[in-house]
Image (cartoon, rainbow, N blue to C red):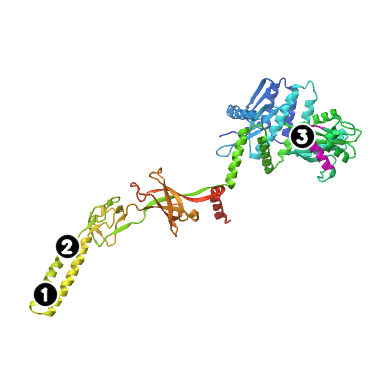
């Protein structure tokens, strides 16, 4: 993805600044009085949203009865059509799922970072009527989250103001009051500041003894401001009674009042609203009331009021208070979420996801989550077969090495590598002409001594006879040595087998020294598999472990193997230090040859699934950091 970050020329502040918020809310509020039609209104709204967020592309879709209003905004002519397809698709997804969404995008080089943001629009009855989607540049995930909250607040206000604009002739003052409320809320930095201002202003305007505001957090009330107090004493009896009354209002989801006379909530209010009655008793009989304030279809905060018993709250007053404060609910959500830390933001996202998952429908997502939970449990507590995958080599179990029997000239070779031979077959021949000559000389010399013996015997010369006899025996011994050497000039195979090394064709005519290697012969059907187990896995290997072996030549022919021997000393191999392990396998096929390579798997046993996945990383970290 390659993007060009576009910033509107008339924007000098960043989204989320108080001035930027005030300008956007003020422009939308002005539209409610000047737009000639709902289509013109939303056409201007999408432009305001795009400028407020410095977006190069924005789109909005609104359902107005049987009509659908769709508006696109793309001011930069250089990027016409570049962002719009993605924004439209994102808008369509939001219309289907009815929720605020964000998608973070980043270019391959990491220099360009953008986000697609969308927010759902609601009518007065908190039913979804459309959505708005924009593309914005981002500095990080937190920056995108802040812009999403800002878009959500603007969209909420725009949809509310747009619906109220259709009835502004019947209610001419409502839009002005709403825009002023949202503009005022934008000037506060924290929820506590806004709550403090609201509670103290209500106390002064309504002449109340006390006004409290509590935020709805996971079906509980967290009181953040009480008029006239700079802090909230959580353990105070009066605060606890007030909180209980607020939570009663939160559970019932409608306004409650309790006074000396029957209240507008009903004649049985005292029996139905016991916690409010207890609060009233705790404050010596003063009139009390609690009002839930909504944003996006749920209770955001509860406002509780108390004043003299002779001035109970009427239904009209309660509705007027609700109408004046309801616009602040969306701003309170924006302020509260903008001040969240990263951990709290993650916890809130997880909680919202769980809540949405537990709602009706969405069976596909529920099945997916159950599958993920089952997989996580299996990874954490389950076991799986653990195998070592290592390179291996076919080699003979034993072999015979044939060397030169003496210093001599090679005159003939009859076998080469790969030849199958029998015991006694001629392998090669050495030149024995000099030996034959020496034998002839010794034979003649033996005959001479035989004549000397005969002459000495005729002359009865005992000494000479014995001397000739000794010399003849010496000569015959030398003849036997010559005969043995002549026999050894023809090198024969001592066993049946296969020639696995030795090609002497290029050495015919050269003189070989005693002990020079000639051939290596391996007995047939005596092959084994030699495995090179990495040093890091040597501790997992033991005798008699089973496994499988697949030769590279025919990987489809998998054979079983069993570890029979482990060398006591490691060896340096191509991939580093390795423990050499010997294993037997069925290797009697004629096409298998010593020196062939393959891949072997040794079945070590069962291990924890998580250990199988991360034990190498753990070992690496231990080595690097000496853990």
Q: What's drawn in magenta, residue-wise?
A: 238-255
Q: CA distance from mark 3 to mark 1?
A: 142 Å
Using a 10 Å C-alpha cutoff, classify the residue at mark 1 as few (fewer than 14 neighbours), some (14 to 19) or many (20 or more).
many
Residue 74 pos. (x, y %):
62, 27
Residue 471 pos. (x, y %):
16, 73
Quarter placement of the N terminus: top right
Residue reaching furthest to the right: 310
Residue 112 pos. (x, y %):
59, 37
Residue at the spot 44% in from the left edge and 48% down from the top edge: 548
Viewer-proximal residue, 61 or 361? 361
Task: Check residue 436 in the rendering and tell me which mark sits there, or answer none.
Answer: 2
Residue 241 pos. (x, y %):
83, 41
The chief SS type of the magenta part is: helix
Residue at the spot 56% in from the left edge and 34% down from the top edge: 2
What residue does disc 1 label?
Answer: 453
Above or below, comparing residue 445 to residue 320 in the picture? below
Based on the picture, tell me whether residue 430 belongs to the magenta stretch. no
Q: CA distance from mark 2 to mark 3?
A: 121 Å
Residue reaching furthest to the left: 458
Residue 401 picture quarter: bottom left
> Dot 1: what SS?
helix
Based on the picture, tell me whether residue 248 belongs to the magenta stretch. yes
What residue does disc 3 label?
Answer: 185
């Amino acid at each position: 993805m390659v993007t060009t970050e576009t910033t509107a020329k008339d924007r000098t502040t960043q989204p989320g600044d108080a001035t930027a918020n005030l300008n956007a809310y003020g422009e939308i509020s002005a539209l409610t009085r000047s737009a000639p039609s709902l289509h013109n209104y939303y056409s201007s709204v999408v432009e305001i949203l795009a400028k407020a967020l410095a977006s190069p592309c924005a789109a909005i879709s609104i359902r107005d009865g049987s009509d659908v209003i769709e508006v696109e905004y793309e001011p930069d002519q250089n990027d016409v059509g570049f962002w719009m397809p993605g924004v439209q698709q994102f808008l369509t997804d939001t219309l289907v799922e009815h929720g605020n969404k964000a998608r973070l995008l980043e270019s391959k080089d990491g220099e360009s970072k953008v986000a697609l943001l969308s927010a759902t629009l609601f009518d007065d009855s908190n039913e979804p009527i459309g959505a708005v989607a924009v593309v914005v540049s981002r500095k990080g995930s937190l920056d995108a989250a802040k812009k999403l909250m800002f878009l959500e607040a603007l969209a909420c206000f725009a949809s509310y103001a747009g619906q109220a604009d259709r009835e502004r002739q019947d209610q001419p003052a409502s839009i002005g009051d709403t825009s002023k409320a949202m503009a005022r809320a934008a000037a506060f930095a924290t929820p506590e500041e806004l709550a403090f201002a609201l509670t103290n202003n209500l106390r002064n305007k309504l002449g109340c003894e006390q006004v409290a505001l509590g935020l709805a957090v996971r079906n509980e009330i967290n009181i953040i401001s009480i008029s006239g107090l700079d802090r909230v004493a959580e353990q105070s009896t009066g605060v606890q009674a007030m909180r209980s009354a607020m939570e009663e209002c939160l559970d019932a989801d409608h306004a409650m009042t309790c006074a000396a006379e029957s209240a507008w909530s009903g004649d049985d209010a005292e029996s139905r609203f016991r916690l409010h009655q207890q609060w009233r008793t705790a404050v010596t009989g003063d009139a009390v009331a609690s009002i839930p304030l909504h944003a996006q279809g749920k209770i955001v905060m509860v406002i509780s009021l108390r004043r003299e018993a002779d001035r109970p709250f009427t239904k009209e007053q309660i509705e007027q208070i609700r109408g004046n404060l309801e616009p602040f609910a969306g701003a309170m959500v924006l302020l509260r979420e903008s001040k969240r830390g990263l951990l709290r933001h993650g916890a809130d996202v997880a909680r919202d996801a769980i809540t949405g998952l537990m709602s009706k429908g969405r069976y596909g997502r529920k099945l997916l989550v159950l599958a993920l939970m089952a997989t996580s449990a299996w990874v954490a507590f389950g076991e799986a077969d653990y195998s070592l995958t290592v390179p291996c080599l076919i080699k003979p179990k034993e072999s015979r090495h044939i060397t030169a029997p003496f210093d001599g000239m090679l005159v003939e070779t009859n076998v080469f590598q790969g030849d199958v031979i029998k015991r006694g077959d001629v392998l090669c021949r050495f030149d024995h002409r000099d030996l034959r000559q020496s034998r002839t000389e010794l034979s003649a010399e033996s005959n001479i001594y035989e004549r000397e013996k005969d002459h000495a015997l005729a002359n009865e010369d005992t000494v000479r006879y014995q001397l000739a006899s000794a010399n003849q025996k010496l000569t015959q011994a030398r003849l036997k040595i010559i005969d043995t050497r002549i026999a050894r000039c023809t090198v024969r195979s001592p066993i049946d087998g296969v020639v696995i090394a030795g090609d002497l064709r290029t050495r015919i005519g050269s003189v070989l020294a005693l002990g020079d290697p000639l051939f290596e012969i391996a007995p047939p059907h005596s092959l084994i598999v030699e495995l090179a187990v990495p040093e890091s896995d040597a501790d997992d290997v033991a005798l008699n472990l089973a496994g499988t072996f697949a030769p590279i030549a025919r990987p489809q022919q998998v054979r079983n193997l069993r570890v029979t021997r482990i060398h006591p000393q490691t060896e340096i191999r191509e991939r580093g230090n390795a423990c050499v392990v010997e294993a037997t396998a069925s290797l009697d096929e004629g096409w298998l040859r010593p020196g062939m390579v393959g891949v072997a798997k040794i079945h070590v046993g069962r291990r924890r699934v998580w250990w199988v996945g991360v034990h190498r990383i753990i070992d690496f970290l231990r080595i690097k950091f000496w853990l």
